[in-house]
Image (cartoon, rainbow, N blue to C red):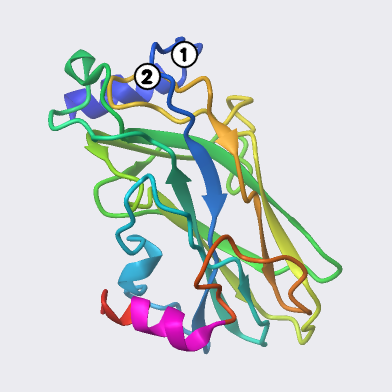
Amino acid sequence: MKKLLIALLALLMPAVVLAQSFTPTLYLEIFDLGQGEDEPDPVPDYVCRHPYQPWWEPLYMSCYVPRYRYEWVGIPIHLTKLGPPECPYPVGPACEGYGGYSGVPFGVVQTGVHPIMFIGWNACPGFVKGPSEAGEPAACVALSDLCHSSWEHAGYLLYLNISTSIEANYFHIVANADLGHNMVMSCSGTYYVNTAVGGSSVQCGGTQSFACPGPPTDVDQTTWGRIKTMFR
């Protein structure tokens, strides 16, 4: 807990320039978690744990789902290009020069004619939620006192569509409204100032308007389904 508190305080301080050349890249994914009035509990494992993928291989992600009434939608944040290997030690100076990450601040905005109701931002196992003065999802923070790899999601946003609309809505990564940035925290407890935003948007409903990164795409239900079954 003490180490986690130190990491939390560091996250609220000005960013520190890192020596590493890693360029962590933020993406959103999106999953249909089923229909009904009850919140999905627990969420499927793949919401918090991306199928293992070496950092050097082409990215594959789920960036589109159809839209239905009383549909629950899970939107995890995914990080890539963290470099090898992740630090084997708890977060701190001993991790300088390793890859991996220990936290991420960010915000999410939604665009579309009929918004989907935001329910909450949830930390995944191994992470805890940080403070949010501006409110979620404008200011989301996840932190850990351990080093995590790119296939471990820090957390996910949960939405519920109570509208009868099936029109497209889009969700976009933006800077954390409290901190004014979305720089990823390294395992040494400092910021990756080279943090970038890759596939910043995902889509729910309407005709899919952009391709998901890499094979398999979400529209390839058979292939994607086989991947997801590995984590059930």
Which residue range is magenta in the image? 220-227
| Residue ID at (45%, 77%) | 39
Kind of residue indicated by mark 1: Met
- Dot 2 falls on a residue whose secondary structure is helix
For image coordinates 40% across by 52% down, the residue present is 57
Kindly give the residue lying farthest to the left in the view shown.
89
Q: Which element type, helix, strand or loop, lies under badge 1? A: loop
- How crowded pointer 2 is (Cα within 10 Å; few <14, some 14-19, many 20+) is rated as few
- The answer to whether mark 1 and mark 2 are in CB contact below 8 A is yes
Q: CA distance from mark 1 to mark 2?
A: 7 Å
Residue in the picture at 13% in, 28% down:
89
Query: Which quadrant is the C terminus positioned in?
Result: bottom left
Residue 218 lies, in percent from the top left, at 55, 76
* Residue named by callout 2: 9
Label 2 sits on what residue type? Answer: Leu
For the residue pair 140 and 152, the one nearer the viewer reads as: 152
Please state the horizontal and vertical placement of residue 38, each as a whole percent of the image. Answer: 46, 83
Where is 35 relative to 26, above or below?
A: below
Using the image, determine if residue 66 lies above or below residue 124. below
Q: Is residue 180 in sight in this rendering?
A: yes
Q: Is residue 207 above or below residue 197?
A: below
Task: Report which quarter residue 182 is drawn in.
Answer: top right
The residue identified by callout 1 is 13
